Amino acid sequence: MIISLAGYMGSGKSHISKLLSEKLNFTLIDLDKEISTRSQISISEIFRTKGEIYFRKLERELLEELLATSENTVISLGGGTPAYYNNMQIISAGSVSIYLRTRVTTLAERLKRQKAKRPLIANIPDDELAEFIAKHLFERNSFYNQARYIVDTDDKTPEEIVAEIIQLPDL
């Protein structure tokens, strides 16, 4: 079984996927980290030197490979992964897809503390961050909402979120 976690940056995909994979004794694959490892270059460096289209092609190839060959795996998707090509369709067809839905206000608070590590938002002033996230999320929600399950993350501990995921019918 493959479980894939989708959601906006700051929704907790990396942390929740780590806890979930440990709880289920599944392999954990963070899509962005795997791309970076295989390319031997950071994601921000790929974007800077080769561009987003190049990155999205790498991402798609790896996604197809993982969905075709992985067993008992939790995949933490990149925040933008579902919004390109027909990625969300193949994610949902090849795995139990879960959207970690988080309110804009929660995302903004979390991301303010992580801006230095997030090239997409690094130069956005704190007072404009929530509006940026809201617009970006609006563009991506139609893709995220195609996930088989939606788990709201606000006001829950990571452990509560993992427990809720484990209780889903397909798991």
Image (spheres, rainbow, N blue to C red):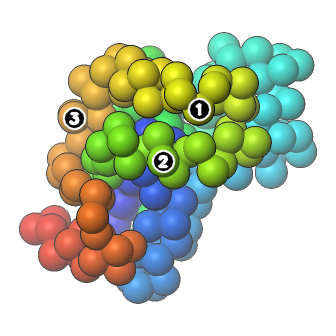
Using residue 107 as the reference point, say whether residue 138 is left or right of it.
Answer: left
Give the mark toward the camera: 2 or 3: 2
Using residue 54 as the reference point, say whether residue 23 is left or right of it.
Answer: left
In 3D space, how far apart are the residues under numbered discs 3 and 1 (Cα atoms)? 27 Å
Give the mark toward the camera: 3 or 1: 1
**Amino acid type of the residue that numbered disc 3 sits on in the rendered structure:** Asn
- Residues 61 and 111: in front is 111
Report the number of discs.
Answer: 3
Which residue is the site of mark 1? 126
- Residues 154 and 50: in front is 154
In 3D space, how far apart are the residues under numbered discs 2 and 3 (Cα atoms)? 23 Å
Point out residue 77 in the picture as x, y percentages from the top left corner.
49, 46
**Amino acid type of the residue that numbered disc 1 sits on in the rendered structure:** Asp
* Residue located at (66% from left, 14% from top): 53
In the image, is residue 50 above or below residue 93?
A: above
In 3D space, how far apart are the residues under numbered discs 1 and 2 (Cα atoms)? 9 Å
Label 3 or label 1, whichever comes before in sequence order: 1
Which residue is the site of mark 2? 109
* Residue located at (48% from left, 83% from top): 22
Which residue is the site of mark 3? 145
Question: Outermost residue, front direction?
Answer: 127
Q: Residues within 10 Å of mark 3 (few under 14, many from 20)?
A: some
Q: Residues within 10 Å of mark 2 (few under 14, many from 20)?
A: some
In the image, is residue 158 above or below residue 29?
A: below
Label 2 or label 3, whichever comes before in sequence order: 2
**Amino acid type of the residue that numbered disc 2 sits on in the rendered structure:** Glu
